[in-house]
Structures are given as structure tokens and as C-alpha cells.
Amino acid sequence: KDIVCTVNVQHNCIDSDCTEVVGSIVQQERAETTQMKLVIRHKPTPKYLLNTYSIHKYAHIYAALPSSL
């Protein structure tokens, strides 16, 4: 099928209850450094936020969504 439109979605950490913080090694130019940074470990849920700037393609987006949403 042809691509009708694209959308931008972001993981919904609040509704997914992503609260675990873990340390991650900082990479610089594809190389690991000795520095660490804290990052949130995302839970594998199907909960996403739709970027509202893509709402001008609402009819196409609505047609692609499962009826459970």
C-alpha cells in the first residue's frame, strides 16, 4: 500500500508508570566514555502520545487506529 501520511508519537511514561531510573554510559562519537548519566527505563507498553501537529491528517490517522482506542 501507499504511504498516506506519517505521524510522530512519543512513549507515554506517565500512563505507562515508567519510574525506574538507571545509570547509562555516555557515548561520545560512537565511543564509550567513563561518564554516566541517569535515564528512565521505559516499560514495554502500547501507550503513546500523538503529536498534535499531525492532526491535519486526522481522517487518515483515525482510520489506522484500532477500534479499542
Image (cartoon, rainbow, N blue to C red):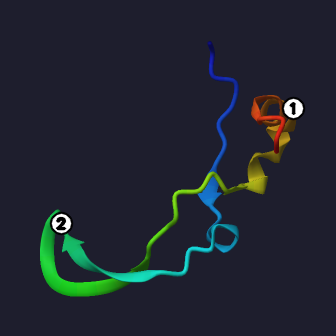
> Quick one: label 2, few (<14), some, or many (20+) residues within 10 Å?
few
In the picture, the quarter occupied by the C terminus is top right
In the picture, the quarter occupied by the N terminus is top right
**In the depicted view, which residue is nearer to us: 43 or 34?**
43
**In the depicted view, which residue is nearer to us: 61 or 12?**
12
User: In the rendered image, which residue does mark 1 sit on?
Assistant: 59
**What percent of the width, then of the height, locates residue 30?**
17, 63
Task: Name the quadrant containing residue 16.
Answer: bottom right
Height in image: 7 above or below 30?
A: above
Distance CA(mark 2)–CA(mark 1): 42 Å
Q: Earlier in the sequence, mark 2 or mark 1?
A: 2
Left or right: 12, with 22 as reference point: right
Whether the residues at callouts 2 and 1 have beta carbons within 8 Å, the answer is no
> Quick one: label 1, few (<14), some, or many (20+) residues within 10 Å?
few
Task: Name the quadrant containing residue 68.
Answer: top right
**In the depicted view, which residue is nearer to us: 61 or 47?**
47
The residue depicted at 84 percent of the width and 35 percent of the height is 67
Task: Name the quadrant containing residue 3.
Answer: top right
- Closest to the camera, between mark 2 and mark 1, is 1
**What percent of the width, then of the height, locates residue 18?**
56, 74
Q: Amino acid at mark 2?
A: Glu
User: In the rendered image, which residue does mark 2 sit on?
Assistant: 29
Left or right: 33, with 38 as reference point: left
